[in-house]
Amino acid sequence: MSIFVHVLYRHAQASIDGRDSTPQSREVIKEYHFYVSDDRELDTLFVQHCFGVIYDSLRHRGVLFTEHWIWSDGCARQFKLAHYFYWLSRIHKETRVPHTWSFFEIGHGKGEHDRAGACVKRALRR
């Protein structure tokens, strides 16, 4: 199986979270999003689909966002293809949301998304 883990940090919005983030009192909400596929090829189309689901979910819930920062490993098959950069430029134009994408060296970007994904994979295998 393949799993795509998206850890989303956003400022709280009163209409959604019951509290608001202000410059004087920052309220940060953390959400985990897991996308599981039985297709072992976690390719760029799967990643694009996952981001589409994320954006649709945010819009549906009324979450406002003005920028999107992404950190990922440098896997060429998933994130560094010409098709993917074309899609990223298109989504930037459609949403009017600037995207900043930072790449870790392959195998060196271990973070909480890796730990969360391992827990989900272990639970699914059981």
Image (spheres, rainbow, N blue to C red):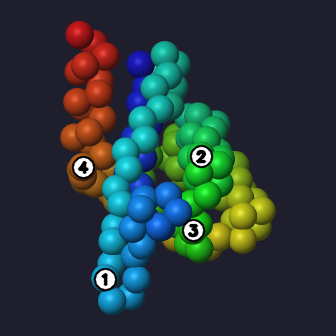
Q: Residue at x 28, y 54 (%)?
A: 109
Q: Which mark is residue 25?
A: 1
Task: Tell me which amino acid carries mark 1.
Answer: Ser
Give the mark nearest the N terminus, 4 or 2: 2
Q: Which residue is mark 4?
A: 112
Residue at which label 3 appears: 65
Cα–Cα span, label 3 and label 2? 12 Å
Q: Is residue 13 left or right of residue 58?
A: left
Quick one: label 1, few (<14), some, or many (20+) residues within 10 Å?
few
Tag 2, which secondary structure?
A: helix
Q: Which residue is mark 2?
A: 57
Q: CA distance from mark 3 to mark 4?
A: 22 Å
Q: Residue at x 42, y 47 (%)?
A: 6
Residue drawn 57% across the image and 68% down it: 65
Camera-side residue of 103 and 96: 96
Which mark, residue 89? Answer: none
Earlier in the chain: of badge 3 and badge 4, it is 3
Q: Please state, as top left, top right, bottom left or bottom right, where the C terminus lies in the image.
A: top left
Badge 2, how many Cα within 10 Å: few under 14, some, many 20+? few
Comparing labels 3 and 1, the label whose residue is closer to the camera:
1
